[in-house]
Amino acid sequence: MRTAVVVVSHSHALAEGVKELALQMARANTSVWAVGGTEDGIGTSALAIRDALASALQAADEAVVLMDLGSAHLNTVMAIEMLDEELRPRVWMADAPIVEGAILAVVSAASGDSGEEVRERAQEAREMRKLISGGVTT
């Protein structure tokens, strides 16, 4: 099974950067789309997300979407609703931090995991600790 990863951010540069980092860290040849920003600058576009999802679903069986902020989620929901009805069940939204989640998602997708499995791996990033007890605090 081929699962694509779609990174949605309010910033085009951030979406591209997350994509680049995830592909480098995963050392994988996986389908990853980056979509973000608007013609006016910062923001997200349901139409741009829909187009990215449609492209991702042409290249893969399923797609997992990672989003940065609240309205990215709202526009992703609208984008999914704009897809043809038979494509909608092939899209999974991950509730995960965008950077760590994207890395885990790309590694999982490169392993041939299903969309549900890729989403679950991405969501494991919610539990990733950055500081360990006994570390320096301010």
Image (cartoon, grey):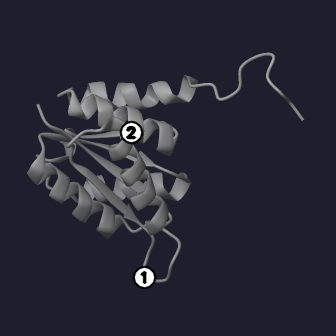
The residue carrying pointer 1 sits among few (fewer than 14), some (14 to 19) or many (20 or more) residues within 10 Å by Cα, namely few
Q: Earlier in the sequence, mark 1 or mark 2?
A: 2
In the image, residue 109 above or below residue 37: above
Q: Quadrant of the C terminus?
A: top right
Q: Amino acid at mark 1?
A: Glu
| Residue at 39% over, 39% down | 25
How far across and how far down the image is residue 47, in percent?
A: 30, 69
List the single residue furthest toward the right. 138
**Among the 4 quarters of the image, the one containing residue 17:** bottom left
Say if residue 94 shows up in the picture: no
Residue at 40% of width from left, 41% of height from top? 102
Inspect the image, locate mark 2, and give the three-letter code of the amino acid beneath it: Met
Residue, x 45% and y 51% (percent of image)?
Answer: 73
- Residue 66 visible to an observer of this rendering: yes
Left or right, 118 with reference to 83:
right
Near-viewer residue (28 or 2): 28
Q: Indicate whether 115 appears above or below 78.
A: above
Residue on which disc 2 sits: 25
Q: Residue at x 9, y 53 (%)?
A: 58
Of circles 1 and 2, the one toward us is 2
Which quarter of the picture shows residue 121? Answer: top left
- SS of the residue under disc 1: loop
Disc 1 vs disc 2: Cβ atoms closer than 8 Å? no
- In the rendered image, residue 78, in percent from the top left (x then y), is placed at 35, 58
Q: Nearer the viewer, residue 84 or 125?
A: 125
Residue 76 placement (x, y as % from top left): 37, 54
Tell me residue 72's x, y (percent). 47, 57
As drawn, the label of residue 39 is 1
